[in-house]
Image (cartoon, grey):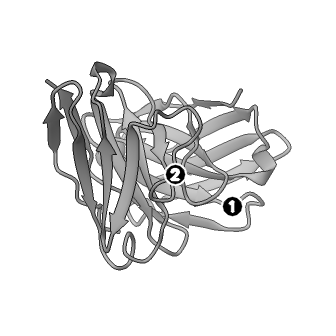
Amino acid sequence: QVQLVESGGGVVQPGGSLRLSCAASGFSFSASGMHWVRQAPGKGLEWMAFIRYHGGTKSYADSVKGRFTISRDNSRNTLYVQMDTLRVEDTAVYYCAVSPSAWRFDYWGQGTLVTVSS
Amino acid sequence: QSALTQPPSASGSPGQSVTISCTGTSSDIGDYNYVSWYQQHPAKAPKLMISEVSKRPSGVPDRFSGSKSGNTASLTVSGLQAEDEADYYCSSYAGSNSVVFGGGTKLTVL
């Protein structure tokens, strides 16, 4: 069955950096587009970033553009997001999600909590 | 990248039907048939319920249906059951490899 397991969350000070990972299994990772979506405490879902199956196409929400970098290692079936210059408002649960087609998120990980606080 | 507009709350009694709206613009919902709906129970990851406006993934009850008219998409839950109580989010492709979500609707089964 499809499994997406995020890791790397934690507490970081404003201005700091963190790298999240998402280990994928149970589907053809190297053939699937992948996304990061976040959810601030008590708030709604916010799309953050997308990477096409080959890694050659990436896109970002305006709120994270220039600070976050999405990447993938198809040999390791792993998705990443490097988060730099973190702000208090980046505090959220971060989910990875697989999108085989049609801009839908078929499966989601359990999420990893990032807290940006001094 | 403005969020899609959903009502904050909706409610219905068991067995009734409820419809949740999701309003976007001619640059997202109005321009693409890539509207999806997600169900999220407390402290759980979202679950895909509807994709491409009206397609139900395998395993989703046929009580859930989706539609679209112009810049507004809708999710209808028929024959409400207690387990349908959850937050529901719409999303749409918004061009340039981006996606936009709605603010979410809390569905209460009375």
Left or right: A47, with A24 as reference point: left
Residue A66, image x and y in percent? 49, 65
Q: Nearer the viewer, residue B58 or A4?
A: B58
- Which residue is the site of mark 1? A52
* Residue at the (40%, 66%) spot, across then down: A62
Q: Chain of mark 2?
A: B
Q: Quadrant of the N terminus of chain A?
A: top right
Give the mark toward the camera: 1 or 2: 2
Screen quadrant of the C terminus of chain A: top left
Q: At 78% from the left edge and 40% from the top edge, which residue is drawn?
A: A77
Q: Residues within 10 Å of mark 1 (few under 14, many from 20)?
A: many
Local secondary structure at mark 1: loop
For label 2, count other residues whose C-alpha is less than 10 Å away and answer few (under 14), some (14-19) or many (20+).
some
Q: Are marks 1 and 2 on the same chain?
A: no
Indicate the secondary structure of the residue bearing disc 2: loop
**Residue A11 picture location, percent across and down:** 41, 30
Work out whether B90 lies above or below A113: below
The residues tagged by marks 1 and 2 sit, at their Cα atoms, a distance apart of 23 Å
Residue beneath the point at 63% across and 37% down: A21
Residue B23 percent location from the top left of the image = 26, 64
Marks 1 and 2 in Cβ contact (< 8 Å): no
Residue A28 found in image quarter: top right
The residue marked by circle 1 belongs to what chain? A
In percent of width and height, residue B19 lies at 24, 47
Residue A99's place in the image compared with B80, above or below, is: below
Question: Could you tell whether B107 is left or right of A70 in the image?
Answer: left
Residue reaching furthest to the top: B82
Q: Residue at x 32, y 28 (%)?
A: B84
- The residue labelled by disc 2 is B55
Amino acid type indicated by mark 1: Arg
Residue B60's mark?
A: none
